[in-house]
Image: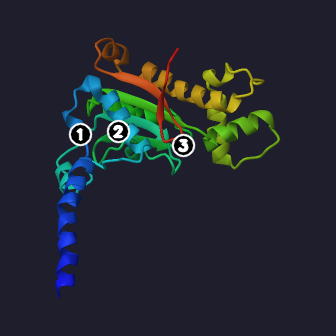
Amino acid sequence: MIRYTKKYTQLIWLFPIGIIIFLFGYKKPPIVPSAEEVPKEQILDFLLEGNERFAADEPLHPDQTLERLRNLSMGQHPVAAIVSCSDSRVPPELIFDQGLGDLFVIRNAGNIVSDYEIGSVEYAVEVLGVPLVIVMGHTNCGAIGAFVDHDHDHSHVFPEHIQKIIDYIDAEEEEKALPRNIPNFFEKAIEANILHGVHELKKNIPHADSLMAHNKLRIIGALYDMETGKVHIIEDK
């Protein structure tokens, strides 16, 4: 009986030590404001911070509750519009660590910006008042890969509607300007397609020049690296 008491007396002494280790070792999750609370001029930094959490495997998954879902039934107030590829590995809400109602997303194969996409972005800017539009491509894009393959070998036959995507990319002035003999043609073709989308939106969104001049709207390109999980801004030269 005495030996039994001594054994548990030793364990009792370990308890406060465990508490100390827990208190000093516990790392509280960062307090992140709701996307709608962030000043418009800071939205891009806010989204890139979310991407840093995602790439570090420390996402917070904000705004993903049933309460959030019910509140959104009254209306939406996204903080950014994103045109991205429909590739299943490129979900913008996860990449930027955002939730329900935070992003207005338009997706298609190759993140192409044509009439329908311009109309969707126009709605986001004119009606929903988003201050930021991102055209986001990604590494190893299948649509751009098909364009590159077709550019090098016109004898390859693609299904009709896939060929239409390739033809659209092939007609982009930014793609035509690329030298075909550069070793990183595939990577540069991805960037050129992103910049084409940026240019199309800047030319076709009503009052885009005025909105950008008054810092009420930003239209930028971005590249998502599927190996690192990081998003890099593509400068429009």
Q: Mark 3 near mark 2, Cβ–Cβ under 8 Å?
A: no
Q: Which mark is residue 50?
A: 2
Q: Of the residues shown, which amino acid type is indicated by label 3?
A: Met
Residue 37 point in image, percent of width and height: 19, 34
The residue that appears at 32% across and 44% down in the rendered structure is: 98
* First reached walking from the N terminus: tag 1 or tag 2: 1
Residue 235 point in image, percent of width and height: 50, 20
Q: Mark 1 near mark 2, Cβ–Cβ under 8 Å?
A: yes
Residue density around tag 2, few if under 14, some if 14–19, many if 20 or more, within 10 Å: many
Say whether residue 235 is visible.
yes
159 shown above or below 31: below
Q: Of the residues shown, which amino acid type is indicated by label 2?
A: Gly
Residue 217 point in image, percent of width and height: 32, 21
134 shown above or below 68: above
- Is residue 53 rendered to the left or right of residue 114? left
Which residue, given by chain and number where applicable, does mark 1 sit on?
A: 32
Which residue, given by chain and number where applicable, does mark 3 sit on?
A: 226
The residue that appears at 21% across and 58% down in the rendered structure is: 17
Q: Of the residues shown, which amino acid type is indicated by label 1?
A: Val
Task: Kindly state the secondary structure of the residue where label 3 is placed.
Answer: loop
Task: Kindly state the secondary structure of the residue where label 2 is placed.
Answer: helix
- Is residue 237 rendered to the left or right of residue 49? right
Residue density around tag 3, few if under 14, some if 14–19, many if 20 or more, within 10 Å: some
The residue that appears at 66% across and 35% down in the rendered structure is: 167
Image quadrant where one finds the N terminus: bottom left
